[in-house]
Amino acid sequence: MTQELDIIKGIHPGFILDRKIKEKKLRKGQLALSVREYPQTITTITKGKRDMNTSLALKLEKELELEEGYFMCLQVFYDIKKEKEKQLKSTPNLSKLRPVIFWDTKMDSIDWLRQYKAIIKRVFERGNQREKDEITRFYGQDKIDEVLKVNYNVF
């Protein structure tokens, strides 16, 4: 199981379930009835719209003759992948920003989403091109233009 998990970790367990169902030449409705579950539940999981739960995972693993914990391991790896993506989106790449720009505060205490106007102004007033590029990547050009346009209209 370990080698296979290394290849497919990060993929929603429903997509793997769908593949396993096809390999066994089963129908989703048949499988759902055999594990005493609603067919809609199996369908939404195989489409990646619903997460796998422990109870259902155990039933499916038994029915599909898979190792116990297979689907829950996939679910955990998928959750980790999603959390990492979320964390990447919530802060810019701090290695590209010099702490001296934020000399009056700790960089790890900055709320990058709520304080975006002050951050954008500060970086575009005091930052180098690399820092401006990172802030533009993080917030997007539209947000940068919105903040800086307001700034330019003041003068």
Image (spheres, rainbow, N blue to C red):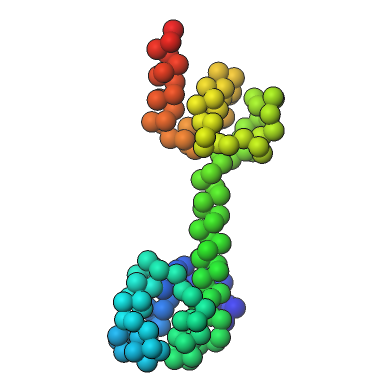
- On the image, the x and y values in percent for residue 92 come to 56, 39
Q: Quadrant of residue 110?
A: top right
Whether 71 is drawn above or below 25: the answer is: above
Q: Quadrant of the C terminus?
A: top left
Left or right: residue 14 versus residue 87 is left
The residue lying toward the viewer, choosing from 10 and 45, is 45
Q: Quadrant of residue 140?
A: top left
Residue 129: tell me if it is visible.
no
| Residue at image location 54% in from the left, 47% down from the top | 88
- On the image, the x and y values in percent for residue 26 come to 32, 89
Total numbered labels placed on residues in the image: 0
| Residue at image location 41% in from the left, 73% down from the top | 14
| Residue at image location 51% in from the left, 31% down from the top | 116
- On the image, the x and y values in percent for residue 126 come to 59, 19
Q: Quadrant of the N terminus?
A: bottom right
Whether 38 is drawn above or below 100: the answer is: below
| Residue at image location 40% in from the left, 25% down from the top | 146
